[in-house]
Image (cartoon, rainbow, N blue to C red):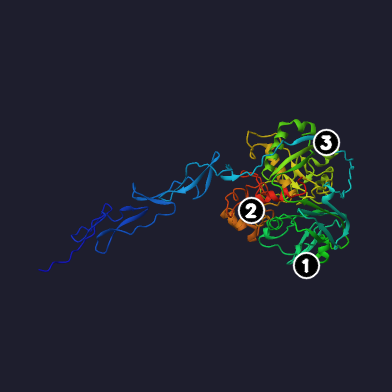
Amino acid sequence: MDRAPFVCLAVAFAGIIACGSGPDCKNPCRAVGATQCSGTQLQTCKADTNGCLTFSAPVACGAQQFCSATANACVSCTNTCPNVGATQCSGAQVQTCTADANGCLSLAAPATCPSGQTCVSGQNRCLSTGEVACASAPVISTGSVTATDPGASPACLRPVAPSALPAGQVNHIGVKTVGNVVPFDIPTNTGGFSIVSQAVNAQTGDVTFSFSGQNVTVPNSVVPLIVKDPSGATFYDDNAPLPDDISTALAVYDDLSPSTGAFSVPNTSAALSLFAGGVPPGTWSFTVSDFANECANPPPGLACVSGASTTSTYDITVVTRPGPVPAQAPVDVGIYLVTNNFTAATAEVSPGFTRMISTLQTIYSRAGLCLGNVTLYDVPTWAKARFATGVSADKTGPCDELDQMFTLSLPGNALNFFFVDDITQPASGGGVGSVVGIDGTIPGPSSFSGTVHSGAVVNASNIGRGVCGSSIDFNRCGSDVTAYIAGHEGGHYMGLYHPTEAFGDFFDPIADTGTCDCRQCAPVASRAKCAANNPTLPPGQVPTEVTGTDCNKGGACDGSQFLMFWLLDDSSFGTFSPQQGQVVRGNPAVH
């Protein structure tokens, strides 16, 4: 006899589908909607067209979720770190973020850093300090400046100074006019050289260029137009466009230097490689020039609006640095106390001041530099009255207070620091932080003291303040902060640029300092305002600036661990890359 087809009647009661109990159903789950885990994924009970119950195919849980066998449901991870591979310091050891079998993130047990490294708070990763052991402590002495009070309406001083280097390293060429081609000889076993140009009768007014319909006004900076090596090949052309990666350029001269300027090499990774066996000996040449001269003969793409001149004259000296660059070398320091908080006598015995010098020694030892003679100079009362709080961060011309103060520096070959009580900030404000140090120019005219660019200014108001423990602390110890500022500005004076500039769109010519591109490294919500994205911003608002925590991750977002990073913040560590160390040890300021 024919059997009638099985009919399943579905009746909903108390949330249970009373279906699928016929003799042909093999129900692996008890009710529609019931769940179970399949590994880290979730299966849900469903009824087919016959009303029979079965589990669906496994489905992944959401981001940072996993299937809990206890709850038979997707639950969220309780993560204790942000992403796999992220690191965090635990004392001097490091913990690394790992994912468990469920994909949840947690910090592994602390591990010892590789040999020669320590875990650095603020960087949250293992880093090498690269410190060298200096044979002796700095020799501290005192001196004084006896410059005459220039009166209420001081003239603009623009002295032409001689080099303090030994005669065998100095080729004083004399006064030349812009446009003159000047030959100079480089002896064998030369590690580097500097072309120092000092204004004799140079145009003081600004120069305005037009580029793509936009006017740009700049000080009349001195700069060699073209430098050629002994083969006649062009080593440097001031009008040639920079490569996208400027570490591949043979030389970079990228700072404003009106009146006095120093073109010093090697200062790029490419030049360090080229000069590894010494600068090619023989007769080099360069064309004396400044922006006013370039305005009179503008390159393609530029038009001169105003300020053109072909008559400026400069006193020219070429100084050389014997090679090879040593692994360790001494540098002398002069500290001019343009501050109401210290005299040379009180600074010499001040615990806060000696702490500052000790920390500066430690910082520079990371570049292979050891402090030699440190001279503390008193300055006249009139100089303190004029400069202690009178230097402005946005007035850096040769006749402004900043550069006029540098003319107080005495003859000798030292890094000259001018300690003041305050640096006046730009009225417009905006951006991150405030200016606490300014160098004369990058690089400074090393071994030429008394010029408008012979030094760097440092806000020293924090010396002796804060909490200073046994370890260097750039967050709480004021003396350490001042040492950091001085070390940074001295790095500029010896030829180093910021690894990444504030807007994260321009990088230094050293390949091993990393980059921190705003478009990749700034917080996602802030990237639209990165300068490289050409944002339209309200008046007074600056583009997004990259900070230490944006640039302390290694890889594509690196560089805040270095002393020369543009910002001093909670992530600052104050070290040098190997190539940065080579540049500073090769500077004429180093003995």
Write down the residue under mark 3.
Answer: 143
**Dot 3: few (<14), some (14–19), or many (≥20) neighbours within 10 Å?**
some
* SS label for mark 2: helix
On residue 299, which mark appears? 1
Q: Quick one: label 1, few (<14), some, or many (20+) residues within 10 Å?
A: few
Q: How many angstroms separate mark 2 from mark 3 (CA)?
A: 40 Å
Query: Marks 3 and 1: which is nearer the front?
Result: 3
Element under disc 1:
loop
Q: Hey, what amino acid is under mark 3? A: Gly
- Residue 381 visible in this rendered orientation of the protein: yes
- The residues bearing labels 3 and 1 have C-alpha atoms spaced at a distance of 49 Å
Q: Position of residue 482 (x, y in %)?
A: 70, 40
Pointer 3 or 1: first along the chain: 3
* Foreground disc of the pair 2, 1: 2
* Labels 2 & 1 near each other (Cβ < 8 A): no
Q: Is residue 369 left or right of residue 345?
A: left
- Give the number of the disc on residue 512: 2
Image vertical order of residue 418 relative to residue 394, above or below: above
Residue 349 in the image, given as x and y percentages of width and height = 75, 30
Q: Quadrant of residue 280?
A: bottom right
Q: Is residue 415 left or right of residue 534?
A: right
Q: Nearer the viewer, residue 430 or 582?
A: 582
- The reply to whether discs 3 and 1 touch (Cβ–Cβ < 8 Å) is no
Is the C-beta separation of discs 2 and 3 under 8 Å?
no
Residue at 78% x, 54% y is 193
Whether residue 220 is visible here, answered yes or no, is: no
Q: Tell me the CA gap for discs 2 and 1.
A: 33 Å
User: Which circle's residue, 2 or 1, is located before the other in the chain?
Assistant: 1
The amino acid type of the residue labelled 1 equals Pro
What amino acid type should be assigned to the residue bearing mark 2?
Answer: Asp
Q: Position of residue 73 (x, y in %)?
A: 35, 50
**Residue 423 position in % (x across, y down):** 75, 44
